[in-house]
Image: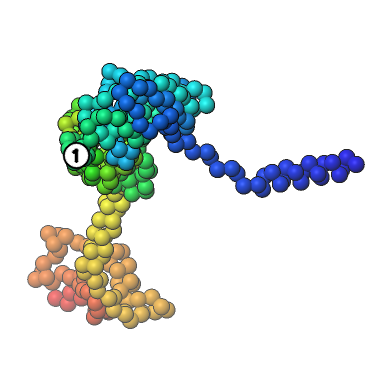
Amino acid sequence: MRTIRTAAALLAALALALLPLAPATAAPTPVVELSQAEGGKGGEITVSGSGWQPGSLLMLLICGQGSPGTGVIGGTNSCANTEGRAATVDARGAFSAKLPVTEPPKPCPCVVHVAGVTGRQDAVDRAFTVAGHPTAPLPEPSGDGRLAVLAAVRLDGSSGLLVWFGAPPSREIVFTVGNLGSAPVKDPVFQVGTSHGVFTPQYEERQWRGTVAPGKKALVRLPVELPAGAHGDYQVSVKYGEKVLVEQPWGVGRPWGVTLFWLLLAFVVPAALFRIGMAVVDRNRPARPARPAHATTGPGRPARTRSRAAGRRRTRTPESVRPDPGDGEPTAVLPWFSPDSAPSAPESSPTTTKGNA
């Protein structure tokens, strides 16, 4: 019985392990609902919503020159700010608040603008008609977009093997921007610079392809590259216009492969030059003359060797003490031999004696 229970428990654990994991739930989309779509000045409507960040503070305004698709042209300058209301999101992400109906400073089409003040900077516009308020076509968006960094900055990427040998290190700086202006920002041009120590950053232009609508945000990735052989503590800066948006430190390791290369070069090159020099000397060295074969005298002993041995045993007499041949004294004849030929004189020289007077 115990074995059956153990097997059943193992099968249940295996089945749970094989079940596909539930996908991570994404953040819900904020929703805004109005108690009525039209109202007159002095009236009141109820604004409610769900899907907002719990605990965040919201701002509720009636704005002119706006639509749910394009947002509010002119920003909060087109809204009735003095009659706005604040609302706090509960733990379930919902809220509900009363908003008085008032005429905005700009003509309709009008919207109820709900934007996050704390927490996530979400914004939702719902169409609303203010009875009796002038209406005019929406103007073309004008003015400059204002970008601000909304999320943490990081450097993506890693160094390869070539960077260890001095190749330029490269990364991608990643950050999230939001458009706080009244006009969309299309294909913004950022300036990316790097600095080392006390030196000022050297900026280069990097264009990001995309459009950031007013009140929206976007994830921006820009390439960053350092010079070859760079190492130490660097700082990456990103500017938009005249404003610095991002400053991120970057620590780069020393390219030890370059040091290893020079150490090997200090030993290998001298050894190679020495081998080349020795090969040249061996090639240019004069050839040794071949030794001629000498005739042997006696049982296998060369005559040259015997002559040298006999010469060593002889005692040479200095010329100053040699007798004058004219005196009739006997003169010793020294054998003459050369290394290339056998001696022509016999081994024993004839002895000359004085004749009798």
**Residue drawn at 60 percent across, 44 percent down:** 21
**Residue drawn at 52 percent across, 38 percent down:** 25
Residue 159 x, y percent position in the rendering: 36, 44
**Residue drawn at 40 percent across, 31 percent down:** 36
Residue closest to the eye, 35 or 291: 35
Quadrant in the picture for residue 70 = top left
Q: Is residue 178 above or below residue 295?
A: above
Residue 92 x, y percent position in the rendering: 52, 26
Residue closest to the eye, 267 or 48: 48
Q: Residues within 10 Å of mark 1 (few under 14, many from 20)?
A: few
Element at badge 1?
loop
Q: Is residue 230 above or below residue 62?
A: below
Q: Is residue 277 left or right of residue 328?
A: right
Residue 133 seen from this side: yes
Image quadrant for the C terminus? bottom left
Labels in figure, total: 1
Q: Is residue 14 left or right of residue 107?
A: right
**Residue drawn at 38 percent across, 75 percent down:** 301
Q: Is residue 354 left or right of residue 247?
A: left
Which residue is tagged 1? 139
Quadrant in the picture for residue 6 = top right
